[in-house]
Image: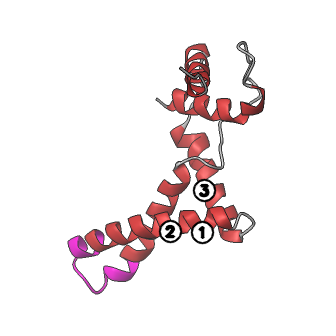
Amino acid sequence: MRQYHAAEHKVFSYKANNKRKNLSMNGASAVNRNCSTNLVVLYFLFLFLIFAVLWPILSFEKSLSISSYVAAAGGLLLQRWLIKHPSSRMRGLILKISYFAQENITTASPGPLHTSTALRAYHGLFQTK
């Protein structure tokens, strides 16, 4: 699964040249600034911060429950804000963490099967019936 994720990123890194069928994506990056990993990073950052504030005053279960819901909403709102403010320092920090996660956790070097599948899927998006 991680290899398909990396192949998808590589396709979008080369999307301007994707009209060619035999596209070589060897030089394409498997890291993508618009990856949903950013949202996951935001969620867990919010979760840990809110939980750290609530746990001293509430039970573990109550703190975790509240933190989970607030982190989901907060992560979505902050993600939208970060998209609208691309030059913010906070976005730079979030992207550094997200890039680390993408490089070391959520993607792996794709093989020919993964890249050809990603290319077929990408081309399929633009075919009209």
Type of residue at label 2?
A: Leu
Q: Are marks 2 and 3 in contact (CB under 8 Å)?
A: no
Query: At x 45% / y 62%, what residue is drawn?
Result: 43
Q: Which residue is mark 2?
A: 77
Type of residue at label 1?
A: Trp
Q: Which residue is mark 3?
A: 97
Type of residue at label 3?
A: Ile
In the image, 16 versus 27, the foreground residue is 16
Question: Does label 2 or label 3 sit earlier along the sequence?
Answer: 2
Where is residue 24 drawn, in percent x and y? 74, 18
Where is residue 60 drawn, in percent x and y? 24, 73
Q: Is residue 93 visible?
A: no
What segment is highlighted magenta in the picture? 52-64
Residue 54 within the segment the image draws in magenta: yes
Q: Which residue is mark 1?
A: 81
Horizontal relation, residue 17 to residue 32: left or right? right
Horizontal relation, residue 104 to residue 15: left or right? left
Q: Residues within 10 Å of mark 2 (few under 14, many from 20)?
A: few
Where is residue 37 drawn, in percent x and y? 53, 49
**Secondary structure mainly formed by the magenta segment:** helix
Disc number lying in front (1 or 3): 1
User: Of helix, strand and loop, which one carries label 2?
Assistant: helix
